[in-house]
Amino acid sequence: MVDLSVKYLGLTIKNPVIAGSSELTNSVEEIKKLESNGAAAIVLKSIFEEEILLEAKMKSEEARKNLMIYTDLSETLDYVDLHIKEDKLGSYLKLISDTKKEVLIPVIASINCITPYEWTDFTAKIQDAGADALELNIFLNPTDMSDKNFEQTYFDIITKVQGIVTIPVSAKISPYFLKPGLMIKKLSETGLSGLVLFNRFFTPDIDTDSFEIKPANKFSTEHDYCNVLRWVALMSGKVKCGLIASTGIHSGESVIKQILAGADAVQIVSVLYRKGYEYINVILNDIEEWMVRKGYNYISQFKGKVSQESVKDAAAFERMQFMKYFSGIG
């Protein structure tokens, strides 16, 4: 009998397949289904920094319009600001605490954030609600033309949050950096428990009849895992935290490949929409069958076996392979 258990953010989980943040992880009922079908942990649907703050701002502006009830000198407007923020957060905290009562698998909260400002205070309450860990889904727009130090923002957010909570913290990051390898290495040295590679961005398309912008690929495809695989393989052994693969993982084979490259675990979402929760068991069965065939009893026996540091042809992950493939060199 093979053992599929792995370490994820310092937590021992029963297998390497985690249900990533999505609408599927936004209710206790759906999360229970994910657990019963084999998910080893779940990342709750993200709460958005802007969503909380914007809702409070809108309510305050509505209140200011009705001067028969509110005056500029009244403390009510301050109360409205606070109440709306607390109410939004309250719903999220309830989801955490209710889920923890109903499932045995780890529950990871998720915050989609762009600044290290006011929202960071909410993380203490998320911890108190019982979250086993916190994933910072840091979204910095790569098309922003302002002269900001985007990379420093990552460090500012992580430092601020780690000064507030003691539960494990991971960061889900973008692949769009000047030097992705160096950035991943530096982020791993901040005390994070894990890095999730990578965020998926909205992909636009154009309707040639209506001339309107429309979404292109809402879901990842089974071929989208390759860029993540490359960076997991390149960074495995060079980082001081766990690596979690995300995007394009649609089969047991793609999970195995990510672990061979050095991933601790994987996050899946799109395949759950396409094939249903029960497909988690198909993935797990495929992993087990492969391990039996190869003579492995534990995942640790093959983790990182084909990372850049572990293979003879390390250049296969770098530019030399590009030259070989496209120019016939070698």
Image (cartoon, rainbow, N blue to C red):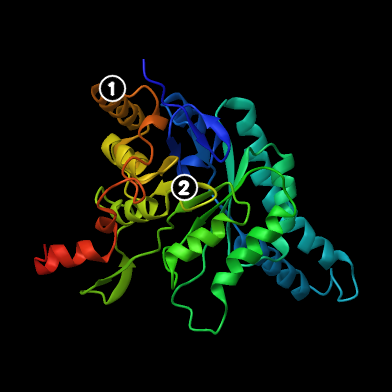
Residue at the limit of the structure toward the top, as seen here: 1
Instruction: Kindly identify the residue that appears in the image at 45 percent across and 24 percent down.
Output: 36
SS for tag 1?
A: loop
Residue carrying label 2: 243
Mark 2 or mark 1: whose residue is earlier in sequence:
2
Residue in front for this viewpoint, 262 or 47:
262
Task: Check disc 1 and give the amino acid type.
Answer: Gly
Q: Position of residue 126 (x, y in %)?
A: 69, 45
Work out whether residue 262 can be spotted.
yes
Instruction: Locate residue 86 relative to residue 39 in the image: left or right.
Output: right
The answer for how far apart the CA atoms under marks 2 and 1 are is 25 Å
Instruction: Kindly identify the residue that appears in the image at 71 percent across and 70 percent down.
Output: 62
Instruction: Locate residue 3 relative to residue 213 in the image: left or right.
Output: right
Work out whether residue 22 can be spotted.
no
Instruction: Locate residue 218 relative to residue 57 in the image: left or right.
Output: left
- Badge nearest the viewer, 2 or 1: 1
- Callout 2: 10 Å neighbours few (<14), some, many (20+)? many
Q: Assign the C terminus to one quadrant of the image.
A: bottom left
Q: Can you tell which mark lies on residue 210? A: none
- Callout 1: 10 Å neighbours few (<14), some, many (20+)? few
Q: Position of residue 160 (x, y in %)?
A: 70, 60
Residue carrying label 1: 295
Vertical arrangement, residue 208 with respect to residue 257, above or below: below
Instruction: Kindly identify the residue that appears in the image at 26 percent across and 27 percent down.
Output: 290
Q: Quadrant of residue 188?
A: bottom right
